[in-house]
Amino acid sequence: MSAQLDQLTAQAANDPDTLETQEWLEALEAVIENEGPERAHYLMERLVDLARRRGAHIPFSSNTAYVNTIPAHLEQHCPGNLEFEERLRSWMRWNAMAMVVKANRVDGDLGGHISSFASLANMLGIGFNHFWHAPTEDHGGDLLYIQGHSSPGIYARAYLEGRLTEDQLLNFRREVDGKGLSSYPHPKLMPKFWQFPTVSMGLGPLMAIYQARFLKYLHARSIADTGNRKVWVFCGDGEMDEPESMGAIGMAARERLDNLVMVVNCNLQRLDGPVRGNGKIIQELEADFRGAGWNVIKVIWGPGWDELLAKDKNGILQRVMMETVDGEYQNYKAKDGAYVRKNFFGKHPDLLKMVANMTDDDIWRLTRGGHDPHKIYAAFKLAQENKGTPTVLLVKTVKGFGMGKSGEARNTAHQTKKLDDEAIREMRDRFAIPIPDDQLADIPFFKPAADAPEMIYLHERRKALGGYLPQRRPQADETLVVPPLTAFQNVLDATAEGREISTTQSFVRIISTLLRDPSLGQRIVPILVDESRTFGMEGLFRQIGIFNQQGQLYEPVDKDQVMYYREDKAGQILQEGINEAGGMSSWIAAATSYSSNNRVMIPFYTFYSMFGMQRIGDLVWAAGDMRARGFLMGGTAGRTTLNGEGLQHEDGHSHVFAATVPNCMPYDPTFAHEVAVIVHDGLRRMVTNQEDVFYYITLMNENYSMPGLRQGTEEGILKGMYLLQEGPAEAKQRVQLIGSGTILRESIFAAELLMNDWGIAADVWSAPSLTMVARDGVDCERWNLVNPTAAPRVPYLTQLLAGTSGPIVSTTDYVRQFSDQIRAFVPKGRSFTTLGTDGFGRSDSRVKLREFFEVNRYYVTVAALKALADDGIVALSTVAEAVAKYNLDPNKPNPVTQ
């Protein structure tokens, strides 16, 4: 390192014309002083551009010096009472620590985090006291994505505000009895407090970007005035390694999201060690964000460094700052002032001279910028006032600030949840917490009297900003009218003779009807990920337009066509391109708009089902946590319906994933009328009743005739199963065939084969949701378990099949586990066989795929005969005869293992 610095010094000393260099530098200083930095920047860009055009090789760099973006003389100082704010922060630090430590002294397995809030406390304090507006009549409210591991600090603040009780703090991470606090931000568990779940790292930054864009969407479409609102998202520097954290920063710049502020807490540590021990994460992120078009503000050094930097006439200090790697910076804060003097300032003799009159304690008190209220305020203010681009603040802090030797800047800081008595005493003294020695062992919470000047100030600051945060609106204030089911008559009726359509086409008709509805039309949000034409939805392009803040600056290549590609400043479609994570994030923003914006929006996100639950399952789970309300439309669903596409495109398991999300209502309808009944039910529950559920509906692109709605089956459709057709009453033997999605039709055809070829009647059951059937059964099981003396509840499936006879065969286009979830509720003594599409997909025709996976009409027929044979109703030779008759290959490899 020393040799490298000597080389840099030598380069400066070898300047061939120091006088000319000085003249250029003085000229630049004069421009900055008299005309401002913007003019200086313009001139420098012109000079660089000229040099490049004349053949000079000037490599691009998106980095600036390793110093604060805002020079000290341009800082806007915090206008608040900093004495009060510092004491309030200290009390919050103490109470956050006490909450975690007390919980783990009682039960050491609860866990919790202290160090993240310790590094964030100043930033959060400045934001809450001076920037973040709560919802009021004239302000929709700022949206806060709080760094998940800092939740104890947020609880500590709410406790001082009187929003949480001491009993709740004592029950941190004890939620089962209904009076505790969730480990992290979870709207599902604290529906009036937390807005956004953020601890699944990477999702917070991604969702925040699309949330900011959705605010622009609402404003452009005159649905809500969001012009004065900001989205603030806090994340850690280690979290930025998640692909989702950085994946949409280009979109944020392209969409000019100046309502977005991302604050990266750069404490230089991941959960277990340094983020970039051999590098500089702040410089790396600066290059990434600045290169993407963001406004970048670095807050690196506290005020004590300003004087030293002012003395740094030859730039040696700045060069040392730049060349020192993050692993070293972490070490400095884990040691002491003497260590910093020797190992940092000792890198150059001129630096040792610079600090010769400073004591080791003085050197130790040279803080990082993230712990100084004025530096933070100045950066927040600049971010708030920035126009035209999103802003990222790269703020350098110390992980575990104030935790002393127990955790400050150490690799173990994140896992620290227990402090010994000495560490607690040290923290008490460092932050001047007025708790006497004889009470320290109990680690009591500290809350001053309500009339203490600091407490009065705390409430005054929030009153000036409209109220307390975080807060969540559980219900929207507005009421929208849902049309009757008959509004979808064009898909409720049977198709005309010779006419065939797909459930995807049926859905397009449904959404077209909704777009014309006077109450709901403007609240429909179609979200697409670049497969619009596959789903037959391209007609919406011209009809309602694609949202783009710039409108359409070009003439589309298909302008001469009826369904041309039209972008519009007030467009209604959100076209996300080839981007499932972005589409889902937009859907979440719209599906939670009732809470975030007091505007009920109805998003329909349509995607290949294979690239839904599987690819963005973590976002789906987050949507459940956020109490999202909307429709996820899994197109071309099932392992055999999307013929020709092959292994990675064929979905045989999305419904298994969907079944795991408790507030997701999954359906796999076969017919157009089923789709209409399910969508209408979703509108009733989510819009009229404002229930916190969302719907996953799979759609097929296979065309066939639709039988139309038979009155009285609506309830069965929604419960998940109903009798579609009965076999001939005169037959002596009978089986029950259950099917869903496109494979239900194979069961229908199998019923014909069973009757025509073998004289066996088959009742055919449509199962639009085996998951809803299974949930009903589980609910009855649980009731009977805990109410043993009460009249037992009978599962819906058991009731349906109780009056029937014969074995049961359930066939779907999904893995067998999908059908197996209802096995426990089949009437006792009845055999139950499942056929499914376990294994990898293949490219081929639908006919060949269903033969390969053994779910076609012939395998359904043979499975029914085998079940009858196992029950002693028919001979095994009959099964063998059927295998031969239908040319089934007994030696064909099992598709499960292929």
Image (cartoon, grey):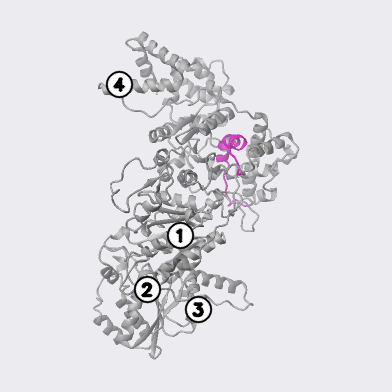
Q: Which residue is mark 3?
A: 798
Give x and y (percent) for residue 686.
53, 60
Is disc 1 placed on a helix, strand or loop?
Answer: helix
Q: Are marks 3 and 1 in contact (CB under 8 Å)?
A: no
| The C terminus: image quadrant | bottom left
Per the model, the C-alpha gap separating discs 2 and 1 is 28 Å
Q: Which is nearer the N-term, disc 4 or disc 2?
A: 4
Can residue 126 be found in the magenta stretch? yes
Per the model, the C-alpha gap separating discs 4 and 2 is 70 Å
Q: Which residues are magenta?
A: 107-135
Near mark 2 (Cα within 10 A), the count class, few <14, some 14-19 or many ≥20, is: many
Three-letter amino acid code at the position of disc 1: Leu
Q: Which mark is residue 50?
A: 4
Q: Are marks 4 and 1 in contact (CB under 8 Å)?
A: no
Q: Are marks 2 and 1 in contact (CB under 8 Å)?
A: no
Judged by depth in the image, the label closer to the viewer, 3 or 1, is 1
| The N terminus: image quadrant | top left
Q: Which is nearer the N-term, disc 3 or disc 1?
A: 1
Tell me if residue 826 comes above or below residue 313 in the rendering.
Answer: below
Is disc 4 placed on a helix, strand or loop?
Answer: helix
Residue 871 visible in image? no
Near mark 1 (Cα within 10 A), the count class, few <14, some 14-19 or many ≥20, is: many
Which quadrant would residue 402 be assigned to in this image?
Answer: top right
